[in-house]
Amino acid sequence: MVNDIKEKLRFELMVPITGEPQVVYILSRVRKILDIDHKGDGKYGILRFYCNWALHTEIEDTKAIKDLLQKIKLPPKSKEHLEALYDFGLFRSFDREFRLFLKEYGFITTIYKKKEETILFKKILRQIYSDTALIIKTIKKTKITLTSGDVENPYYSFGVNCTEE
């Protein structure tokens, strides 16, 4: 079973990214591997968060999510707040953990081979996440909304809104 999941993921990572269904499929296989190997909340907490968001509209709170929310909710326009927004909106932590995951499991991908592939992948990620706000189930519900912008702009135009319900 695990080997089948890994082989399916290996195939999808080797072909150029073509659209949202492929990216969601990749994220679902990554999450399955993390679940099976019990590696989702430790060093891959942010990767698991993004995989879950691609697949669900509500998720349970985790340490990685608490850390992320704490950074996003810093005083507006402070240096730390702006860095957290860029990290979140530009998928920097996602990239770090995804690359680490790929290396650990020996996966090769076209996603990071060419700048155009990376831009397309991130553009699709942004479309996936901007389609659906995410509800994080805690004592208080927190809703994160990512608004899409121009991925080809070197400064990536986007918005992040975090509200408690």
Image (cartoon, rainbow, N blue to C red):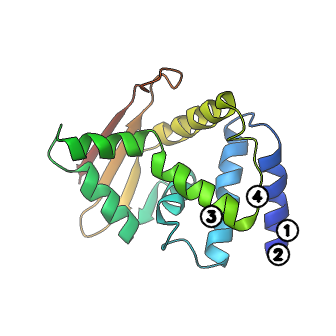
Pointer 1 residue: 4
Q: Are marks 2 and 4 in contact (CB under 8 Å)?
A: no
Q: Which mark sits nearer the N-terminus, 3 or 4?
A: 3
Q: Are marks 3 and 1 in contact (CB under 8 Å)?
A: no
Name the one closer to the observer, 144 or 8: 8
Task: From the top left corner, tell me how far across and down residue 162 is, in percent.
Answer: 28, 46
What is the distance, in whole Å, between disc 3 and disc 2 at their CAs? 14 Å
Q: Are marks 3 and 2 in contact (CB under 8 Å)?
A: no
Task: From the top left corner, tell me how far across and down residue 133 is, in percent.
Answer: 41, 45
What is the distance, in whole Å, between disc 2 and disc 4 at their CAs? 17 Å
Judge whether 3 appears above or below 112 on screen: below
Q: Residues within 10 Å of mark 4 (few under 14, many from 20)?
A: some
Left or right of residue 31, residue 136 in this image: left
**What amino acid is found at the position of numbered circle 2 in the picture?**
Met
Q: Secondary structure at mark 3?
A: helix
Q: Nearer the viewer, mark 4 or mark 1?
A: 4
Task: From the top left corner, tell me how far across and down residue 148 is, in percent.
Answer: 45, 29
Q: Are marks 2 and 1 in contact (CB under 8 Å)?
A: yes
| The residue positioned farthest toward the left in the image shown | 75
Task: From the top left corner, tell me how far across and down residue 79 is, in percent.
Answer: 21, 41
Pointer 3 residue: 31
